[in-house]
Amino acid sequence: MKLLRPSHPSATMVTGTCSGFSPPATFRDGFGRNIPPVPEIVGGGDDKVYVAVGKSVEKAVALFHWTFRRFRDREICILHVHQPSPLIPTLLGKLPATQANPDVVCAYRREERDAMQKLLLDYVSLCARSKVKACVVTTENDQVRKGIVDLVNEYRVQKLVMGAATENWMKVKKNSSKSSYAAKNAPPFCQIWFVNKGQLLHTREPSEDYNILPPSVQDSSALRSQSLHCPNTEREIPQIYCRSSSSTSFIPRSTSMTRSLQSNTSSESEYSSEHDLRVEEESLCKQLDEVNLEAEASRNEAFQELLKRKRLEAQALEANNKVKAYESAHAQEVELRKAAEDKLNAARRENEQLLEQRESTSKEWHKLLRNIAILENQVQEANRRREESSEELKLIQASVATLKIEKLTLQRQRFEAANWLDRWKVRGQPAGASSTTSRLTEFSLVDLETATCGFSESFKIGCESYGCSLYKGEMSNRTVMIKKLHRNNLQAQQEFQEEVQVVGRLKHKHILSLIGICHEAHALVYEYTPTRLESHLSHKTNSYSMSWKTRTRVIFEIANALLFLHSSRPEKLLHGNLSPENIVLDSEFCCKLCNFRFSKLVNEETFRCRSFRQYSEPSSNGHYLFTDPEFLQTGDLTAKSDVYSFGMIILWLLTGSRASGLANIVRRAVSGSNLVSVLDASAGEWSGFVARRLADLGLRCCDSNSADRPAISLVMVKELEHLSALEDRRVPSSFLCPILKEIMHDPQLAADGFTYEGEALRGWLKNGRETSPMTNLKLDHLNLTPNHSIRLAIQDWLCNP
């Protein structure tokens, strides 16, 4: 702790110092005797008032003003407890002092002490402006209230003024503030005034029976008080106190002076008169005045030296800060200079590398110039050869187109020759019921009853026209279907004979095979198939729905079977009742035609007979959607009737719908380029090319005019076969439309030299575009030219695997 007296003292106050002056010879002679020493009095006398202040000057102003008014002409001792901050601000935030860097902690503690010194100077200046003598007592403590009590005990403070937190003293006693702590723990000899906002709240009186000084000091004081009274005078000599520069204890210098004077007067009273004693006393008083003046001058000089020292310390601190800042700036400048030199060296190296690259690039550039000249010559030569080759290519393309046409002609001739060969083979085969019956197995009625448990209803699977019943049975270790005709129905008996003659000799993988017959029961035994085509499209579940690939294959197999029937010669063999109910599927979705109600071996004359029309009525199931409308009007059954039914089955497989006017619905969708809107979604994502080809074929087959319907030909069957296997073959890129990425059906040549699907390109141009879909350049014109060579190539590719 330190004791400071930086304020200028009042001229009316008498004080002294123990150093810094030379007293006169008479003063030294009068006080030079050896007198027994008096113990030092530790603590403040009744003439000092201690004021406890904090860090806020504004809050302490009212406290000082009240003290100045209450204790006039009294010396003020400013009592302050410095509380070091527990947190140290760092670059990482505020850290506890135990965790921060010791150098940082020391620097921050130095800053705190400097701030405390400035604060105390402000308090001293306040006292100086009020012309009040002031000194400072400070200490450091983690708890301010404990530091105040420690200073009171150490300096034996008898008068203490401190602030209170509230005007209600009862609350002050109850709370744990500094004022409450001081009131409870301060020593009894200390009188404390609690002031709030310039108003006295409470005064804690000292204990009357408490003795401040120790016994030895009390005895000395009694002796001094007795010796200060001369026999002839009642005047008491004033005491002069001296404060040490290193301690805060007061030395009673007047004690030695009084004792010297007491010894002199007692010895001289025996030998001199009272007049001499008074003369000597007046001399001593003069010497005392001289000493006071010299002490006052010394104090003024010490005060000036103190201010000068403070200014020098501030200047030294500022100079030290400037030196540190200069050293930091110098170190930063060194680092920047080093970084700049590194960058300069790197730039030099990079410049050297760039120069080397420039030289190598220059060499390469000259080399490229020479190569360009050579390449220009080669380009000219290549252009000349390209022009020659283009002319030759045009001739080759013309020859290829001619060859393709000739190839198609030869293919047609080959197909016709094959048809004639098949007809010749048919003619060479024996006809008649005897030859047909000889190839069929004859079953007895007992065999059929054993297979069907006596034609039990539990084995019955359906009924057909003319009272025919269908049964499922087991014969010869295989599952069979037994078609039992009614005995008393003449039409059924005639149908039995014709079906044995016609179907019995048909051997085709897509026609339901007749295994045997039973004349006794008028029954036919067919191979058994589990489901019909109708059941797969009437149920939309995943277990029954067919994919579009399977549907395309089924269409091909139906066309293959119809081609086999229509190619029979010399008799015309027709199905006559083609519908989804008369198409059965085996376990591998291989289709077979059955229920040949109108299947006849007829010649041209018999085909026109009225007796034949009795079989021309629609079936009992009423499948008018798949029946030729011309047949319903005229009763004329032709091969084109099967073609119409085939076309309606194609449209039904595409859409999965049996709506009336289905052909018109599909035709409107095709003309509006919105075929996908009517396709059956349960078949999966259709191939656009396959769907359009099938839709076109179905619409042509369903034409209302039978003359415009196509015949079931080998070319048609081959094309359908390739459509069913199209996904398994790699399509040449030249056959794909650049817009749709599908096989072109109507290839059209545009002005940019590329071939597109006609429908897609017209849609492109219809939207206001005049640029090429491939090059994005403006087209010279918007005219389209059919590309017959690509069309023929696509047809040839589709017809040949």
Image (spheres, grey):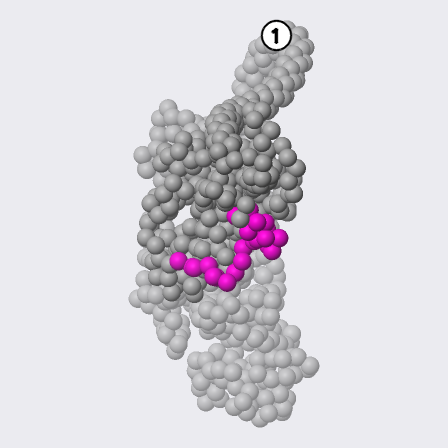
Is the residue 332 above or below the residue 720 in the image? Answer: above
Residue at mark 1 = 369
Residue 148 image offset from top left, x and y in percent: 51, 51
Residue at 46% in and 48% down? 46
Is the residue 645 above or below the residue 741 in the image? Answer: below
Instruction: Give the amino acid at mark 1.
Output: Leu
Residue at 52% in and 86% down? 460
Left or right, residue 366 beside residue 276: right
- Check disc 1: other Cα within 10 Å, few if <14, some if 14-19, many if 20+: few
Name the residue nearer the viewer: 475 or 767: 767
- Magenta stretch: give its range: 203-225
Residue 482 image offset from top left, x and y in percent: 56, 82
Name the residue nearer the viewer: 713 or 428: 713
Instruction: Kindly state the secondary structure of the residue where label 1 is placed.
Output: helix
Residue at 65% in and 9% down? 355
Is 214 contained in the magenta span? yes
Residue 738 image offset from top left, x and y in percent: 47, 37
Name the residue nearer the viewer: 658 or 297: 297
Left or right, residue 674 beside residue 333: left
Asked whether residue 737 appears in the rendered view, the answer is no
